[in-house]
Amino acid sequence: MSQSELETLRGRVDELNSEILKLINERAVVVQEIGRVKEKSGVNRYDPLRERTMLDLLKESNHGPLPQSTVEHIFKEIFKTALELQVDDQKKALLVSRKKKAEDTIVTVNGEPIGQGKPSFVFGPCAVESYTQVAEVAASMQSKGLKLIRGGAYKPRTSPYDFQGLGLEGLKILKQISKEYNLGVVSEIVTPGHLEEALEYIDVIQVGARNMQNFELLKAVGSVNKPVLLKRGISATLDEFVHAAEYIMSQGNDQIILCERGIRTYEKATRNTLDISAVPILKQETHLPVFVDVTHSTGRRDILLPAAKAALAIGADGVMAEVHPDPAVALSDQAQQMNLKQFDEFYESIQKFMNTHHIHA
Ligand code: PEP
Ligand code: MN
């Protein structure tokens, strides 16, 4: 084949490309028009039966050389793009997404604005065990000017024979501590059945990792007027995490804090693998504050500090860590909670780190 023949054929392909392009766009305009008609009459845009008819017609009139499966594949794509055009981007965007709302959401708890630039801290025992146990931690927190305490009253444990938490009794202890030490309370609720009762005792409802895809619970916490701290599921992708937050927001509650707490991988050196990159991704994709739980992600006291520094350096809005007056006898998570002295050192180092790196607003 001569060079000029090749040029001619290529020229013809270019012409055909632009014809196809013109036709696809023309088609899209017609489909948009159909969409408007359907919207007026309240009919669903996607009509699988109509698609089937169109595909059958195309196959009937296809005399090759393209095989039927290829024709079907190409036209399915064409159908899809036209359909997507009908829904405007703003409508399609998730409520939790930056596309929907560009400004950062600020969640205020106990007078503390969360997500406004100054990092927040949540400390406290894994589980509420007694008034004195929580009070010791609370006193230490108050002396540091901290505002948010955590403690589980309902504990989702791997074994049903392990300590399940004090339940309502635990919530009452937290409430008392909250008043005495001026601390906002973050505590996990595991079932919609406990929610209403819990509202008067706590300031932030925690939805734990194991419940991130408990959709009825998500809808329930989405229907109340109380901030929610939503933890990432043990093996949840970020997309699943974001959609879990969407469940909450879709019910009207927009006071949501996301919390990266490590995911399950093959690595055994840590309890979970802290997915630090989740922080900037979630900050980009959503307008919600993002925390890092350094305790459950690492499961190791010896690396709580570097993990917390990493979290702050990468842009987390807050850090959560467990503190217990006597971790050796804790009823849960013995290996990872800090004692009060370790807590003092940890907090002092974090303060220094923030000052050195100008992480404060
Ligand atoms: C907790 O914070 O008490 C807890 C159980 O954490 P997670 O749900 O992340 O395992
Ligand atoms: Mn714990």
Image (cartoon, rainbow, N blue to C red):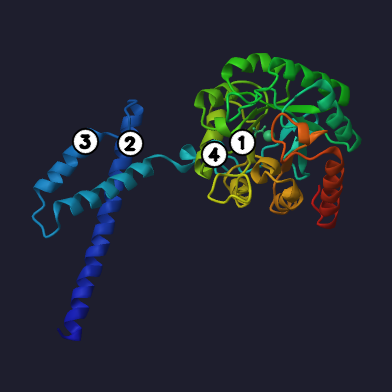
- Residue at 74%, 25% (x, y): give it: 128
Distance from disc 3 to disc 4, alpha carbons, whole Å, reads 35 Å
3 vs 4, front mark:
4
Residue contact between numbered discs 1 and 4, judged by CB atoms under 8 Å: no
* Number of the label disc, if any, that sits on residue 50: 3
Instruction: Look at mark 2 in the image and give the residue it sits on.
Output: 35
Q: Mark 4 — residue?
A: 241
| Label 2 vs label 3, nearer the camera | 3
- Answer with mark 4 or mark 2, whichever residue precedes in sequence: 2
Mark 1 neighbour class, 10 Å CA radius: few under 14, some 14 to 19, many 20 or more: many
User: Along the line of sight, which residue is nearer the eye, 62 or 316?
Assistant: 316
The kind of secondary structure element at disc 3 is helix
Q: Secondary structure at mark 2?
A: helix
Disc 2 + disc 3, Cβ < 8 Å: no
Sequence-wise, the earlier of marks 3 and 1 is 3
**Quarter occupied by residue 317:** top right
Q: Earlier in the sequence, mark 3 or mark 4?
A: 3
Q: CA distance from mark 2 to mark 3?
A: 13 Å
Q: Which mark is residue 231?
A: 1
Q: CA distance from mark 4 to mark 2?
A: 32 Å
Q: Amino acid at mark 2?
A: Gly
From the image, state whether disc 2 or disc 1 is nearer to you: 1
Crowdedness near tag 2: few (<14), some (14–19) or many (≥20) residues, C-alpha within 10 Å: many
**Taking the image as four quarters, which one is ligand 2 found in?**
top right
The answer to whether the residue labelled 2 contacts the one labelled 1, judged by CB atoms less than 8 Å apart, is no
Amino acid type assigned to the residue bearing label 4 in the image: Phe
Mark 1 and mark 4 lie on one chain; the one further toward the N terminus is 1
Q: Residues within 10 Å of mark 4 (few under 14, many from 20)?
A: many
